[in-house]
Amino acid sequence: MTDNRLDPGLLVDSTWLAAHLDDPDLLVFDTTTVLVPDPELEYRVEGDEAGWAAGHIPGAGYLNCQDDLSITPHEFRFTLPEPEDFARRVGALGIGDNTRLVLYSRTQPFWSTRAWWSFHAMGFDAMVLDGGYGSWVARGHPVSTDPVSFAPAHFTARPRRDVIFGKEDVLAVLGKPDVAVVNALSAEQFSGTGGLTFGRPGRITNSVNVPYAQVCDMTTGVFSDAATLRGLFEKAGATPDRKIVNYCGGGISATLGFFAQKALGYPDVALYDASMQEWGKDETLPMEKD
């Protein structure tokens, strides 16, 4: 894209959503999921259906990024299911092949982009609400506490295998001049000098850093403008003429960068789904720190 907007086919605002909320083919889902610190697990994952029930966009359903969109239980949390399982899960939520889908979060915006990435990886392009639930409320739009459910629908998974990376895929591209491996964690975590670690401090060897909190404001949930995002990625060497492989701690916050890159028109973008929860604990895999 050549202007200062992200792709409006992927990122919508609350004004647009209010105008289209009654469209018969449009479904909206709150994707808020909760990470609770846990000394044994780094963190444990919980749903927040109670938060949704206390107030949501009228007609919006609720989905849990772990229980509804991931293999459970699994060694690596938030692992994307096989296509048939994914199709069964989202079809049961009422999401079908002809659905237009808007996803939002009431807390950290990466829940909506993680859900968005899961659908994108399965060949379905949803939309994300910029600013999430907070933007909806701030604009004075109505909220609801009514229960919501949808009739089951038929969803056909058409996986985009090139956007789903495992550790062998990452190993195969490390150091290639036409690939940028992008770490979405904080500068301290990237350098190995502080913050939560996943097995070993530091980063995947030869990766670069674009912290997720620079991609999207963690307080407001609003994405940085297109010019700012281009500058962030280009400064790190993550340019649209290269393949971009995004990773973080558990495949969640890195979806903010993935989403932004797609919304900028980047043609070749991937996510290392297991990310540092796998890489950092496997001492055969190369890491470095400052």
Image (cartoon, grey):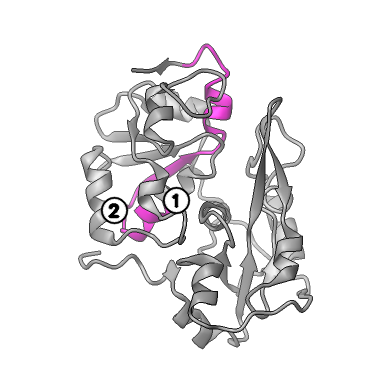
Q: Which residue is mark 1?
A: 256
Residue at the image position 64 percent from the left and 68 percent from the top: 29
Instruction: Give the side of residue 269 with respect to residue 26, left or right.
Output: left
Mark 2 vs mark 1: which is more N-terminal?
A: 2
Q: Which residue is mark 2?
A: 229
Give percent across and percent down for residue 230.
Answer: 25, 52
Give percent across and percent down for residue 153.
Answer: 73, 71
Give percent across and percent down for residue 214.
Answer: 35, 48
Secondary structure under badge 2?
helix
Kind of residue at badge 2: Leu
Instruction: Give the side of residue 274 with respect to residue 219, left or right.
Output: right
Which segment did they paint magenta? 259-285
Q: Is residue 206 above or below residue 254?
A: above
| Image quarter in which the N terminus is found | bottom left
Which of the 4 quarters of the picture holds residue 273?
A: top right
| Image quarter in which the C terminus is found | top left
- Label 1 crowding class (10 Å Cα cut-off): few <14, some 14-19, many 20+? many
Residue 127 can be seen in this image: no
| Nearest to the observer: residue 166 or residue 193 | 193
